[in-house]
Amino acid sequence: MVTNSSVERGPTRPEPRSLARRALVLGTALLLAGAGVTALSGTARAASTLGAAAAEKGRYFGTAVAANHLGESQYASTLNAEFNSVTPENEMKWDAVESSRGSFSFGSADQIVNHAQSRGMQVRGHTLVWHSQLPGWVGGLGASELRSAMNNHINQVMQHYKGKIAAWDVVNEAFQDGGSGARRSSPFQDKLGDGFIEEAFRTARAADPAAKLCYNDYNTDGINAKSNAVYNMVRDFKARGVPIDCVGFQSHFNSASPVPGDYRANLQRFADLGVDVQITELDIEGSGSSQAASYGNVVNACLAVSRCTGITVWGVTDKYSWRASGTPLLFDGNYSKKPAYDAVLTALGGSGGGGGGGGSAGCSVSYSKAEEWSDRFNGRVTVTAGNAPISTWTVSVTVTPPQKISATWNGSPTWDSSGNVMTMRPNGNGSLAAGASTSFGFTVMKNGNSSAPVLGSCTAS
Ligand code: XIL
C-alpha cells in the first residue's frame, strides 16, 4: 500500500529567484540558437527529439540500423527525425564485408554510412574483430596467416571508411561470462593468445588515427568478474600506452538481467581510467512504466558520468529488434512512441508533449533531488508552462521497485495499481502564465535503491 499523506511545505513557486533563472535559461538558449545548436521559439523550449535533447547535453543518441529497412518510409523518417548517430547492425561484421579471404564487399554498409553522412549523423563502426559472424575460413588459418588476415581485415575496412567513423568497436566480446575473468575461446584467442587484442588496437590506430577506438562487451554493465577483467585490461592498456579511447557497454537488459544498481558506478570507474564510455546496444525487454523507468535510469546514469559520450539503442522499432518478442525498444511496431521513449526524452531534458508548437498550451518538467537521508530522499519536480498560458497540467513520476513514495506536497496525486507510478496534478488552481513555473515534492523510501525517479512528459491544457 502506498501512503500519500499530503504535507504542505511552504508556498508554491515562483519565487523571485526563478525569474532570474528563467532569464539565464533564455539567455543561454539564445546563445545556443545563435550557434546553430538548437531551435527555439519564444520562451526557452526543450528539445523534442532524442538526438536534439542528447545534443543539448553534449551527447549523441543513436540506433542500430539495418540497410534493408532504409527503404521503408516510416523506418527512415523515424530514424531521420530522432537519431543523430547510427551503428550498422550487421553490415560491417566480418562475414558481411569479407566473406572470402581478401575479397571485400561494402555495399550494404556504404548504404548506411551514406544515409548517415548526408544527414549529419555520426557512425559507430561495428565491429572488426569478433568471434561471432566470422566466416569459416578465418578459423581454418594457422597462427601466422590468421595474424596477417586479422591485420589486413582491420586495415582494409578502416581505410575504406577512413574519416567517416566516429568510433570503432575494434574488438567485441573477447571475455568469458561468469566468474573466471578469462578470455573467451576464439580463433584469435586460441591461436594468437591474449596479445591479439593489443595488436588489433595498434593496427586500428595506424589505419585511421582520427577514429576513436573502443572495446565493446556485454554483461559488463555492472561491477562483476567479467567487467573487472575488462577493467584490468583497459588499465593495463592505458599504463602501457596501447591505444584505446573508449569502452562500449552493450546493455542488453531483461528481467533475468536487469539494469544493475551499480551501473553508474561501473561506467564511472572506467571513465576514471581515462577512456570515454558509451552505451552501445541498449535494449530493455518489457513494457509500460517499468520498462520506461529502466530506460530512464540508464539515461540518468550516462548523464551522471561526464565521459559517457552517447547512447545507442539496438534498433528503431520493436518489430525489427533481434529480440522482437521482448518489445525492448522505444518505438512499437507501428512506430508509435512508447512510455520508454517519453522517459528517455524527459531524462535527456527534452519535452515531447506539450512543450512545443507556436502558442499552443504546453509545459515541460525538470527534476531535482532535495534532502537525502540514509533510508529516503525528497524529490522536487518543477513544471514550467510553455509559450502560452495553461490552466492545468499532469506529470507522471515513476519510481523503481522496491522504492515507494511515502509522502507528497503541493500536488494532488493518483496512483497506478503497482504503486510505482504517481500521476500528479495541481492541488487547486493549476493555471500558469506563459513561461511561469510551479513545483511539487515527494519523499521516496529507498528500500535499498537510490535511483532517481523517472518523469513522464508534461501534458497541459
Ligand atoms: C546481433 C544483431 O542484432 C542480429 O541481427 C544478428 O543476427 C546477431 O547479432 N552483440 C553485438 C551485436 O555486438 O552485434 C549483436 O547484434 C547483438 C549482441
Image (spheres, grey):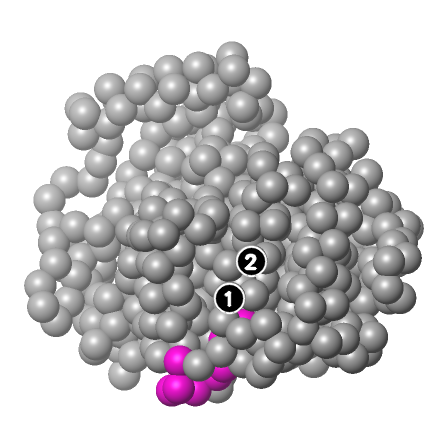
Disc 1 residue: CB within 8 Å of ligand 1: no
**Picture layout, residue 162 above or below residue 257:** above
Residue drawn at (27%, 83%) of the image? 1
Q: Are marks 2 and 1 in contact (CB under 8 Å)?
A: yes
Which of the numbered marks, if any, corresponds to residue 219? Answer: none
Residue drawn at (59%, 72%) of the image? 192
Measure the alpha-carbon separation of dots 2 and 1: 6 Å
Q: Confirm whether the magenta stretch covers residue 208.
A: no
**Picture layout, residue 114 above or below residue 406:** above
Extent of the magenta region = 174-181
Residue 316 point in image, percent of width and height = 70, 58
Most prominent secondary structure in the magenta stretch? loop
As helix, strand or loop, the secondary structure at mark 2 comes to helix
Q: Amino acid at mark 2?
A: Glu
Report the front residue among 412 and 217.
217
Which of the numbered marks, if any, corresponds to residue 195? Answer: 1
Q: Amino acid at mark 1?
A: Gly
In the drawing, does residue 159 fall left or right of residue 279?
right
Quadrant of the image occupied by residue 448:
bottom left
Report the front residue among 147 and 25.
147
Residue 397 point in image, percent of width and height = 37, 60
As helix, strand or loop, the secondary structure at mark 1 comes to helix
- Residue neighbourhood size for the residue with mark 2, other residues' Cα within 10 Å, grouped as few (<14), some (14–19), many (≥20): some
Residue 312 appears in the rendering = no
Residue drawn at (53%, 74%) of the image? 193
In the drawing, does residue 458 fall left or right of residue 419?
right
Which of the numbered marks, if any, corresponds to residue 199? Answer: 2
Residue 386 point in image, percent of width and height = 47, 31
Q: Confirm whether the magenta stretch covers residue 180.
A: yes
Residue 69 point in image, percent of width and height = 85, 57
